[in-house]
Amino acid sequence: MHWKLTESVDFTLSRRVPPEDATRQQRTAAEILERLNDQPGVVLADEVGMGKTFVALAVAVSVVEATRRRRPIVVMVPRGVAAKWRTEWDVFTSQCMRSASGLRISEPLTSGSDFLKLLDDPADRRKHIVLLTHGAITSNLKDPFVKLSLLRQATMYRPKLLDKRGRISRVASTLLRDQRFDSAELVERLLRSPETEWKTIWDRAHPTKQPLDDDPVPDNLPELVRALDLSVLRDVISRIPKNRGATFDARLSDARKALDQSLRTVWHDALRRLDTTLPLLILDEAHHVKNQTQLADLLSSKDARADLDSLRPGQLGSVFERMLFLTATPFQLGHHELLSVMGRFDGIKWKTNRDRTDFSRELDHLRNALDTAQSRAIEFERAWSRIPMHEADACATVSSFTDEVDATHHPTLKSALTVGHQASIATKDAEKLLQPWVIRHIRNGHRRYLPGGAIIGDRADVGLAIDDSASLPFLLAARAQALASLQKNNSAVGSLYAYGLASSFEAYRSTRSDDLGSVVDEITAPSTESSNGQLDWYVNQIDEALPAHDSSGWAGHPKVNATVKKAVELALDGHKVLIFCFYRKTGEALRQRISDEMRDRLYARAGRAFGYASSDVAATRASLQRLSDRLLRTDSPGYKRLQGEVLSLSGKLDKSSAQLLADRVIRFMRTDSFLLRYTDISQDLTVEQLLDGFRSHGVPGDTLRDRVETFAIHLSALEPSERQQIFDELAEIMTGDIRTGWSEGQLATQLLPNVRLANGGVTPANRQRLMIAFNTPFFPDVLVASQVMSEGVNLHTYCRHVIHHDLDWNPACLEQRTGRVDRIGSLAEFLKTDIEVYEPYLAGTHDEKMFRVVKDRERWFGVVMGGSTPGDETAQDRVPLPEALLSKLTMSFSLT
């Protein structure tokens, strides 16, 4: 095996990335291929937003060419980003390849049967790159033709079961859950014929319908099935009822359920017998295999010895010659998770057992080295924390752990340097062992972390204060938690009352009423926790202590209040804001509160300009509508002037695209929000004043005119299909009020269209629309999102402000969220300014404990993965560690 980067790939051709990034991507792809020649796998762990997808595609193309296009390579991706990979393939071939390659990539496959069918396609139409979703192989069997094939194989050579084929034929549409099989004659003909003839039989039976585009059953399936124990399946077939009677439907239903279960077992066992060898697996979001999940089990080696792997053989074990894992966050809670991810390389097709044993030995050495490095780092951190603050100036001059320390300095400094020297040696020893396996590049430091009270302008080293009006529920919750712990004999218990209450009053109440939707209820029934009713009493008191559910009550939750104020402040200044929260009820509440606050402030300003009372919103809105019609009606001078202004900014856009851009700009400029934010509003606002607001409102370099111009440049670099999709989505995005019954028992209220919610309750199509629109200068301005928007999506083009309203125990989750706006071509990069990351937490609560713990974990992640560790917000009273010493305690895996 000798793989190298194919000459057809050239990242410097791309119009989308800066030259230095293109050079890095080119070198990274070449280095990965070189390492894969000698080792089972590589982890590409570049920070989020650095183009891992394109590097992986370059590796994929190179391997396909090196193997003379004879065998496909497989790219396994989360289902939610599979379509994105397919789109980026088109971009990659257009912008990063010297000429058309003729390579074929599949649409994302979501089932194992489709995967097997693709593998047995003839060479002239077989895909060279297969996109396979994470759950495709482990998903239940749904393909009716494959089910029917399994039934055929189970009844072959069994005289007593052959007559059962008639029964199967008569009820096939029910058994297979597919009305296309309602012809008993056709089904019986299929059962009597080899699967290789099924396509012909089916197409002849349906001459007026679209023929099957492929053989409906994978060629190798019958052979895989014959070697399996089918006794359970055969028993189920024998119980299919023969005659219709009073119990026929019930017996058929029972048979179908049993059949589904036995088919599922047979199907998965058949996949495990897959005997093929493919050159490469690329696994996206590989941190998902750090634990023993179904995805991780897929890769378990088929020839694994019991002392090395106690799992059942995986369906994809011993199938691939090499593996490339992509993840920006290879571990969350400790380096043992990184080692677990790397341990999945054990599932390749090994040439010899000795090679596999050597790999296992290397992992053991690496584990010991990382354990030692962590232990030494903890010892050093403790030693450094003992240095008194008055020695800060002396510490700042230290550039090496071996520096001589003046005798007048505090003895703790000398002791800390001695411990640090041992830690630096251990760190470099571990780094040397890990370097062959991991490549990681770090983006230049451009994030500004604003934890705790910093979201409202207070000190960053303290949390948000809970004022007297809201303190009682939190005090009662703390007491209830202590009581729950005591009643469990001081054993570890979950924080039954802390999470929801720290997020919002709505979230707490929803956990109490088991109304979380997709979120697990974390508060158990009090009666199961106590025998004397004490805990029940506290829970009831918490409920009674919650403020009244009105604009001055639940909206006064200290963290909700802080998030709302910051989001509105930023949005009214022309910034986009991305807010992440865990609870669905919190997301709904934030959207409503932010919308209410923004509406009140916008219309209050307009009312003053028009001379209306603050309560007369209807009159204010009517005046705004008349103003919008006068200035921007299609037959007005203002429309023509603004249209001409936008067309002059369109640069390299074709005429049709430039016109579409102008139409979309005017569509949004007509809204109350845009008029109020980007003009000095007045009853007699002129066209010139309107244009002046478009050109100059905001900070230099980031006016609305500037944003439209950069948007036009961005559009011109896209593929035509991408550009059209953006225009289409902007035409669909709401620009008027949205009516909603956001809270049970309340009347429907109006929400501003520039504040939107994207969670698991929003359809994938609408989430996609919101994502595309958020990456434009238009609505939405504020996007409240759940975890469904935290991986694999780009939200960076016009946003550089992130609020983590709800934190997470895993630093990788926070990193993934922030990574949505920290990517190549981000707004922060363009403006040469910082991404602002707000991490509010409530002082003196479980919320603060979570913050402290996650920051400790984040620091160790930064040490191991060579990251630019964020500021030590948890230790403001500690002597700062000089950069020169920090660098000696940080591993590096970049290609220098």
Image: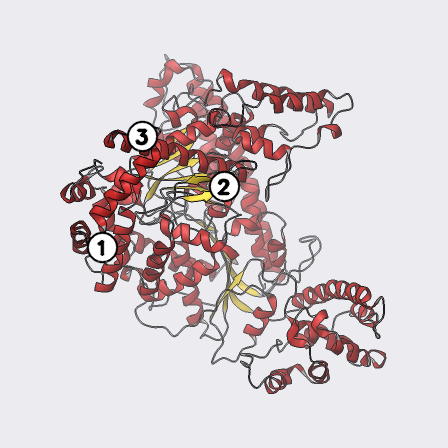
Question: In this picture, is 730 found above or below 116?
Answer: above
Residue 407 as seen in the image, left or right of residue 323? left
Characterize the local packing of mark 1: few (<14), some (14-19) or many (20 or more) Cα atoms within 10 angstroms: some
| Local SS, label 1 | loop
As measured in the structure, the alpha-carbon distance from the residue carrying label 2 to the one carrying label 3 is 39 Å
Residue 754: % across, % down = 37, 43
Res 819 quadrant in image: top left
Which mark is in front, 2 or 3? 3
Residue 383: % across, % down = 48, 22
Amino acid type of disc 3? Ala
Question: In this picture, is 301 found above or below 20?
Answer: below
**Residue drawn 57% across and 69% down?**
115
Residue of label 1: 634
Residue 674: % across, % down = 28, 42
Q: Nearer the viewer, residue 430 or 817?
A: 817
Q: Earlier in the sequence, mark 2 or mark 1?
A: 1
Residue 243 as seen in the image, left or right of residue 731? right
Q: Nearer the viewer, residue 465 or 410?
A: 465
Q: Nearer the viewer, residue 325 or 404?
A: 325
Q: Where residue 813 is drawn, which disc sits there?
A: 2
**Residue drawn 42% across and 35% down?**
803
Residue of label 3: 604
Res 269 quadrant in image: bottom right
**Residue drawn 37% across and 67% down?**
6
Residue 786 as seen in the image, left or right of residue 894? right
What is the image's colouring?
secondary structure
Furthest-top residue in this view: 408
The answer to whether residue 58 shows anywhere in this view is: no
| Local SS, label 3 | helix
Which mark is in front, 2 or 1? 1
Amino acid type of disc 2? Cys
